[in-house]
Image (cartoon, grey):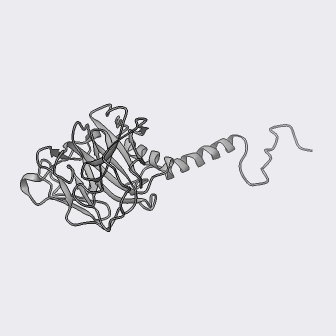
Amino acid sequence: MQGLGKAPRLARLDGRPCGADLQRYADDRRARRNANWAPTALSPVAAPHNAQCRAWWSAGTGVSPGTEGVPVDSWMDYSGFYLVQGTASAKPVFQSSGGPNTLPAVSFDGVDDYLELGAAWAQFRTPLTVMVVCSTMQSTASFQIWSAMNTDSIFDYQGKACHESSYNNWCVRNHQTAFGSSWGLKTLYFGWDWWDTQVWNGGVASNVGLTKGGSPARFQEYAARYVSMGYRSDYSNLFTGQISELVVFTGQLSERTRRCVELYFQTKYNNYQLT
């Protein structure tokens, strides 16, 4: 007969622990799962975690010469695509700690600074989602993706997502608020049709309607497009401020993916108020 004392613990038939061991088991699984989801250098922005990513310029890598206070000759994205500037006076300046959370940024003077692809890019033939981490914009455009000057171009301008299908034929969707601090994270989606446009500031979607001029056309499937940073394609509205990230995705991101990428940047910048 078994003596008095602690009753033997019954094992589960499936081999999993029970009691206090079960709690420790659950905590350990949760910790491992969280570790697997922790942001990495290319997660969840680019492949293999996000197949929609087509270009990602991050000031922390690829800037040449990448020396504090020195003009930028080129800025290579993670895929090896270069934005360049060969004119000395038009080169923006690298700041090793000019971004939020003292991370790197590229500074544009608003007079003549810009970067652009040296040649047309056989990319972006479909609707696009663009994210940009930049300082507060007043009346300037931090980026533009376009097929020909003032023809079927998409860009941000004064807190708006703009789709201009021909000269002076344009549409915008405003955001209801400006950046809440000196820096912001802006997400813009441009669909097939001029009205299929959206903008988010710090993950908050705009509820302001579209404004249009002329007769905007559908998104055109041109063979190639250009990318410029710091100005619009007509060399107007040059950007005054700093840019730390510019990411381009094909198509529209799902709600979950968009939030994952936005949270990645907010985490990267130490939960800086990217609003």
> Could you say which quadrant of the image residue 208 lies in?
top left
The answer to whether 87 appears left or right of 189 in the picture is: left
x, y percentage for residue 192?
41, 55
Q: Is residue 269 above or below residue 176?
A: below
Q: Is residue 12 among the parts visible in the rendering?
A: yes
Number of marks present in the image shown:
0
x, y percentage for residue 102?
25, 41
| Residue drawn at (27%, 64%) of the image | 81
Q: Is residue 275 above or below residue 81?
A: above
Residue ranking furthest to the right: 1
> Could you say which quadrant of the image residue 220 lies in?
bottom left
Residue ranking furthest to the front: 214
Q: Quick one: quadrant of the N terminus?
A: top right
Q: Quick one: quadrant of the C terminus?
A: top left
Which one is nearer the viewer's eye here, 157 or 135? Answer: 157
The answer to whether 25 appears left or right of 201 in the picture is: right
The answer to whether 67 appears left or right of 209 in the picture is: left
Q: Is residue 60 among the parts visible in the rendering?
A: no
| Residue drawn at (82%, 40%) of the image | 7
x, y percentage for residue 185?
34, 41
Which one is nearer the viewer's eye here, 115 or 22? Answer: 115
| Residue drawn at (50%, 47%) of the image | 256
x, y percentage for residue 165?
31, 54
Residue ranking furthest to the left: 89
